[in-house]
Image (cartoon, rainbow, N blue to C red):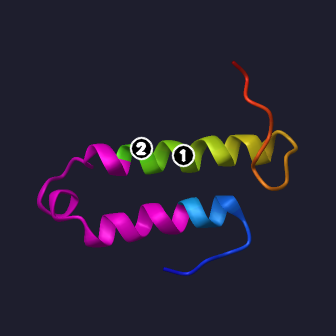
Amino acid sequence: MQHSSSPLDQARASYEDHLDTCRQCAADAVPCAVAKHLRRVYNNLGRAAAHGAPDGTGPRGR
């Protein structure tokens, strides 16, 4: 796995690596729970980056 300086890039790489190596994701048309979690992390970091936090580590809304 490549390590990028951006948390968003790291989250994307983790998600893609998981999809490439997970037997359940490869066998089923539906992503497994881990893939869903990794995708959620990536989406959350993307939203944080879009709202002004350049590293994707903006404040939590809760």
Location of residue 8 in the rendering, given as x and y in whole percent from the top left corner: 66, 59
Residue sticking out furthest to the bottom: 2
Residue receiving disc 1: 41
- Counting from the top left corner in percent of width and height, residue 4 is at 67, 75
Residue drawn at the location 62% of the way across and 41% of the way down: 44
Q: Is residue 43 left or right of residue 38?
A: right
Identify residue type, mark 2: His
Q: Nearer the viewer, residue 12 or 5?
A: 5
Q: CA distance from mark 2 to mark 1?
A: 6 Å
Q: Secondary structure at mark 1?
A: helix
| Residue 10 image position (x, y, % from top left) | 60, 66
Name above or below for residue 53 compared with residue 19.
above
Circle 2 Cα neighbour tier, 10 Å, few/some/many (<14 / 14–19 / ≥20): few
Q: Which residues are magenta?
A: 12-35
Q: Position of residue 24 (x, y in %)?
A: 16, 57
Q: Is residue 23 magenta?
A: yes
Amino acid type indicated by mark 1: Val
Q: Which residue matches tag 2?
A: 37
Q: Is residue 21 above or below residue 41?
A: below
